[in-house]
Structure formats: C-alpha cells, structure tokens
Image (spheres, grey):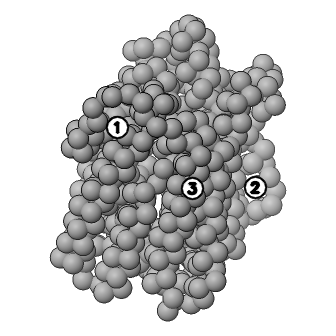
Amino acid sequence: MRAVLINILSISSADVGTRLIGFLAVTYLARTLGPENMGIIAIGLAILTYASIISTMGLPTLGVRSVSANKSSTIDTVKQIISARCFLSVISFLLGIFGIIFCIQDQNIRTISLFYLISLFPSALMLDWFFQGHSKMNTLAIGRLLGMMTYILTIIVIVSDSKDIYWIPIAWSFGLLIQAMFFWNRYNNYYKPNNNNKKSSSLFEIIKQAIPFGISGFISHSVNQFPIIYLGFVSTPESTGIFSVAFRLVIFLLVLDRVFYAIFFPAISKSYKESKEKLEKQIVWTLKIVTTVSLFVAVIFFIFSGNIISIIFGFEYYDSIIIFKILLFYFILTFINSVFTFTLIGIQKENLYTKSILIGAVFFMITFSLPTSFSSIVMVAIALVINEGTAMIMMIFYLRKLISINFISRIIFPLLFYIIFLLQSYFFNNYFPIYINIVIILGTLFSIAISSGINNDDIRTLKHYIK
C-alpha cells in the first residue's frame, strides 16, 4: 500500500512540476517574443503534436502493458517498441517535411516547424513507458522533471529577444535528449535478460497491435491541436499567439485534473471489483468534489482573468482575456469529464469512451462550418467547449445504462449557479467591484456545494484521502 502511495505521489508531483515548469517557460517566452512570435511557436508545436501522433501510434501504452504482464521479459520488448517508434518517426518526419513545404508559405513558420520535427527522434528513444510498466514512478518523475528543467534553463540562457526564436525548438529537442539519456542510464540498472524462447513479433505486427491503443489519443490530440493549425491558416500568427496563451493557461489549470485522476482512479477501479453499489457511491462522491472544485476555481479565474493575464503575460495579450473566459467552460467540462472518463476505463468500457470523444470531435468540426459573425479565434474556443460538452453528454448516456446515478442533477444545477453568479459579476461589478467579487466568490462556493449535494460525510471522506 505504501509503494502504491509513493507511486501516486511521484507521478502526481511530476505532472504538477512539469506543467508548472512548462507554464513558466510559456510566460517567459510570451513576454520575450510577443503575440506574433508566440503564434509561430504554437503552430510549430501543433505540427509536432500531429507528427508525434503518427510516431507513437499507441506504442507506449502497448509497452506498458507488455512489461507489466511479464516483468522478466524486457530486452525484446524494448527493442521492438524502440525500433517501431524509430521507424514511425522517420515516416512521420518525412510526411511532416512534405506537408510543411507544400502547405506553409511563411518562412519563419516553416523553419520553426522543421526544427521542432527534429525532436521526434529523441522522443522515439524514450523509455518512460518501461518505468511506468515496472511501477518505477520515482524514476519516471525525475526523468520528466529533468527534461523540462533542461528545456527552461536552456531558453532562459539563450533566448533574450525575438531574434532567438529558432533556438526554442532546439532547446525542446535538447531537453528531450537529456530525458532519454537519463532513462537509458537507469534502464541498465533494471535490465534483465529474456530467458524465454518466445518468438519476437515483427515490426509491423507490433505497430498493428499498438494501433487500437492510439485511437482515442489520436482523436483527443487532433481536436486539441486543430485550433492552432486552423488559426495558422485562416488568421494571423498574432491571433494564434493570443489564443495559444489563453489555452496554455487553461492547460496549466488542468493540472488539478491530473491530481484528482491519480487519487480517485484507483479508488473507482477498486470499487468496481468489489460491488456495483460501492462503485455508484464512489462515483457520486467523486462527482460532487470535482464539480464543486472545478466551478469554484473557474469563477475565481473568471473574475480576476484580466489582472491574471496582464500580470503574467503583459498587456500585449489583452485580447486573450475573452478567449480565456470562454475556455474556462472547456476547463470545467474537461475536469468533470475526467470522472466519466476514468469510470468508463475503470469498468473496462474503453470502447464507449472512444465513441464518446469521437462524437464530440464530429460536433467540434461541424461547429467550424456554421455561419456566424464571431471571429475565428472566438469560434475555435467555442468549438472546444462544444466538443467537451458533446463528449460529456455521450458518456453520461452510456453510463446511465450501466449505473443508476442521476448525473444530470449533479452537474446541471451547479452549472446554472455558476452562470448566474457570472452574470451578476458582469452586470454589477462596475458599481462595487471589491464587494461584488467577494460576495460572488463566497456565494458561488456555498451555492455550488449545496447544489452538488456535498455534506459533512463527504468532507470527512475528502480529508481521509488527503491524509
């Protein structure tokens, strides 16, 4: 039990740490480069993400499952996964070069994107999946933090103005290389020869086995990165930078989602194995806490969004404020969706989760074809909210067939209170801003907690988890 707790704390701290370091890097670059150059960097990273989808293709997940199932068989698994990733990275790199040359006209975006594609190769050498499969979360945490620390220190030392923009993707690749080298060094300590005579799968067999694991990741990453690519084509790099800054701030807030996942996913999986009644009770309690926390955090950041963005990123990003306010709904829905996601995965209904996010992705794309007077930057933010909302509706639809829980009342009522208090802030904040904000923050917390159904027993249970 103590080992499990250490693993949870290690991976949670690593996730929090890497997101914090990444956010500090974005803050530094936003102030150093300005909105236009931040848009160029965002487009380059988005292209890298799409290329990474091809180069990974579910292989890390397959590797985790393989080494978890047979810890004595390591060398064959490592060789197969690394070989497959290197092969796919070459394919992805060549496809990326072809797409960049023929689809992108701006020379700066071309160069930055090409430099980012280089990082596919150190990524292909990563052994983070190996340590995850062996439950060496402490090593995994150190490696990830080391890579991000290398990245941020490199850009702080080298990048001092917009002329140094080309060093940023190089620093990213260097951080990944240091991380990969660390993992390989530690791998030698855990390496054990494969004593069985089982015939190794071919390269293409391994890739074929991994594809089902990569489908849901392909859908979610494609949706999350599409706005940057879309804005890169239909708008200006400056608009892309404005959106990117707001989106990065929301992604940083979603570190809360990862912490809750690490704490509650094991509990839901355990409840499912014990009884349906315990599972339903665990889901209801988790939904109460997650809904209340997400809405309370969102209302605080909504009220102070102007000050937060201006102080962190500078007044150049004033237009990011409205985008950030819209994306706070994306934050809320994503946070709440995490409960449904790890419930479906925990009860071994991954196919229903994949169907849900696929339907969400369809509505996401439909949103872009709707006639509207909104600007493209506002539409992509709205589309992300619609994507998460649609996925939530579908997951609730599937779960209600399996579990007798009234999900609607647990979510709709708290959301209504959140919207009501936001409207009060909008209409009355100009008269008594300080007092209105205090009333709204306290009133939101109280109203959401009551409407979510939180009671003293729920608070005691939360204290038990924290301890």
Q: Are marks 2 and 3 in contact (CB under 8 Å)?
A: no
Which of 135 and 13 lies nearest the eye of the viewer? 135
| Residue 192 marker | none
Q: Residue beneath label 1, please? A: 213
Q: Is 64 or 252 nearer to us in this picture?
A: 64
Mark 3, Cα crowd under 10 Å, few <14 / some 14-19 / many 20+, is few
Q: Amino acid at mark 1?
A: Phe
Residue at 60 percent of width and 64 percent of height: 148
Identified by mark 2, the residue type is: Asn
Residue 437: which disc? Answer: 2
Badge 1 element: helix
Under circle 3, the secondary element is helix
C-alpha separation, residue under disc 2 versus residue under disc 1: 46 Å
| Residue at image point 67% right, 72% down | 312
Q: Is residue 346 above or below residue 302?
A: above
Left or right of 420 in this view: 403: left
Residue at the spot of label 3: 185
Name which of mark 2 and mark 1 comes first in the sequence.
1
Q: Is residue 255 left or right of residue 118?
A: right
Name the residue type under label 3: Asn
Quadrant in the picture for residue 332: top right
Residue 45 seen in render: yes
Residue name at image x 54 percent, y 31 percent: 339
**371 left or right of 34?**
left
Q: Sequence-wise, which precedes: disc 3 or disc 1?
A: 3
